[in-house]
Amino acid sequence: MKAIFLACNQALYDEVLQEMTKLGLRGYTSWDEVVGCGMKDGEPHLGDYVWPTLNSAIITMAEDDKADKLMEAVRKIDEENPQLGLRAFWWQIGGTF
């Protein structure tokens, strides 16, 4: 099982959720307004008068096969929208109760 953390421009939030729904990933926690700045390039998303854009964030747990499919789907979304910003990170986790 993998934990997947996604941070994306708010404009991509619904598209990410649609991909999760397609994969049957129902359980998640999200944050509507997240600020940040990417490591590579792009503009900061700080929600202020200089950098007004905001991000959203999602964390979900998924079986390995669904996690791999979600990572591929969000990679495609990011490639189609490079100016908006979307990052996803995963790590192995133990079981749940």
Image (cartoon, grey):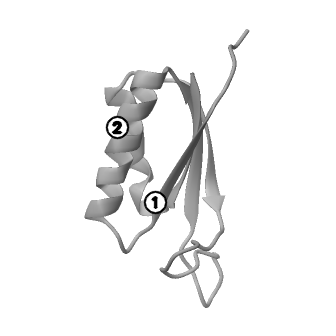
Location of residue 15 with respect to 85 vertically, above or below: above
Q: Is residue 85 left or right of residue 5?
A: left
Q: Earlier in the sequence, mark 1 or mark 2?
A: 2
The residue at the far right in this view is 97
Q: Nearer the viewer, residue 25 or 48?
A: 25
Location of residue 14 with respect to 70 vertically, above or below: below
Q: Is residue 64 left or right of residue 39?
A: left
Quadrant in the picture for residue 54: bottom right
Task: Give residue 7's position: percent from left, percent from top.
Answer: 55, 55
Q: Residue at horizontal 35%, vertical 70%?
A: 82
Crowd tier of the residue under label 1, counting other residues whose Cα lies within 10 Å: few below 14, some 14–19, many 20 or above? many
Q: Which residue is label 1 attached to?
A: 86
Q: Amino acid at mark 2?
A: Glu
| Residue 25 can be seen, yes or no | no
Q: Residue at horizontal 55%, vertical 25%?
A: 27
Task: Give residue 33's position: percent from left, percent from top.
Answer: 63, 59
**Which of the numbered marks, if any, corresponds to residue 19?**
2
